[in-house]
Image: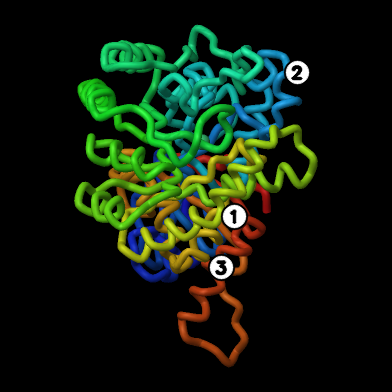
Amino acid sequence: MTRTLYAGGQVFDGTGAAPACADVVVEDGRFVQIGSGLDGDDRIDCGGKTLLPGLIDCHVHVMFSGIDVLRMIQTPFSYPFYEAIHNLRATLDQGITTVRDAGGADLGVQQAISNGLIAGPRMQISLGMLSQTGGHGDDWMPCGASIPLLVEHPGRPSTVVDGPDEMRRKVRELIRNGADVIKVATSGGVLSPRSDPRRGHFRDEEIAVLVEEATAAGRFVMAHAQATDGIKVAIRNGVRSIEHGIYLDDEAIEMMLAAGTWLVPTLAAPRAVLDLAGIGAGLPQHMIDKARMVVDVHTESVRRAIAAGVAVAMGTDSGVGAHGDNLRELALMVGCGMTPAEALHATSLSAARLLGLGDELGSIEVGKRADLVVVTDTVTDTGTETDSDTADRDALDVDTLSARIHSVYADGRLVAEPG
Ligand SMILES: [Zn+2]
């Protein structure tokens, strides 16, 4: 078996330890040795570079390529599958080797990646988002037509349900069709035509059945939850992660801490909508108005959640905006009070734990799958400042990280070389 040596890099292992110079040996797709003076059959010189764990984005939509309603309704049904090939490549180029698709990707997309037919990060899929009538996943338009962003098909069924019985049957159907994780909208949202992000959706009995069925099948539940009521109904009933979390009050934050509920902020999402509006994308006015309404209160909620110690995992909602800009989210998280190291942790080991993959992914540790990102400009040696804090700050600078991705490995194989 070939031993590949990544020699002489600065290793940010993702465990919370300070970056340190080390050799890393990979064999058969896994980390087998980490230390100094190691040897290998193949040698990759990492001098002057930093090694990060493969990064993880917990909220993407690989089948969306930037929301533009006028463009999307004129796009042929199968076209987004081909666009996804490009989106997946752009995601890998950011050093992201694992994603959770929050709606859109189906079993065929996932299998095409896992079989090596197309390049992409390994993926957990949700297929679609369970929604009540009039909720965030209901595409009914005031003209009377339903115009979904992606049309349902046999592998991606309609997900509008009302009442515990419909909820139970639909969760089972999603799992049958390949869902690794169940997504529900417990509040309105920005993109949907008739919902209000400040209103909670579904009642306790419906969410309790959803979580019961998902748990029985060994699946976690993620909740698009923006309204305070919708956030609380999700936490109360055992949902694993709150996506967006726009209107968090003190009680919601306390409930998250008590239940161990994760927050996936997606700070980039409302900004992406406003950016799209700025470049003339075909967006209904209600989307733009709602994005404006939530952007500041969202930032403030995330800031308070971080300060209170809520567990945070990185997610971007990429697909709402263009793919390949994922690492912008880290700078936004730093803007809400995280250190760069904490933002990277949220994008590696914390994210892996949220996805139930903490034993296999998320850190550079012996025994784990060898997902690695090699980044340039590790240490700027000025000759005057020698303390390691200076070196760490340069290596982990999240503002420039996207431009410093040199090469990306998944399961020990080179999967991207943007640098
Ligand atoms: Zn989303």
Q: Residue 74 carries which label?
A: 2
Q: As displayed, is residue 385 above or below residue 291?
A: below
The image quadrant where one finds the C terminus is: bottom right
Label annotation for residue 6: none
**Amino acid at pointer 1:** Arg
Instruction: Please identify the quadrant where the N terminus is shown.
Output: top left
Ligand 1 has an atom within 8 Å of the beta carbon of the residue at disc 2: no
Residue at image point 41% right, 54% down:
346
Secondary structure, mark 3, is loop
Going from the N terminus, do you reach mark 2 or mark 3 first? 2
Q: Mark 3 points at which residue?
A: 397
- Dot 2: element: loop
State the CA–CA distance, disc 3 to disc 1: 12 Å
Quarter residue 213 falls in: top left
Nearest the eye: 414 or 288: 288
- Amino acid found under the numbered disc labelled 3: Asp
Which mark sits nearer the N-terminus, 2 or 1?
2
**Residue at the image position 44 percent from the left and 65 percent from the top:** 338
Q: Is residue 25 left or right of residue 49?
A: left
- The answer to whether the residues at label 2 and label 3 have Cβ atoms under 8 Å apart is no
* Outermost bottom residue: 384
Residue 328, which numbered label? 1
Q: Which residue lies furthest to the top in this view?
A: 154
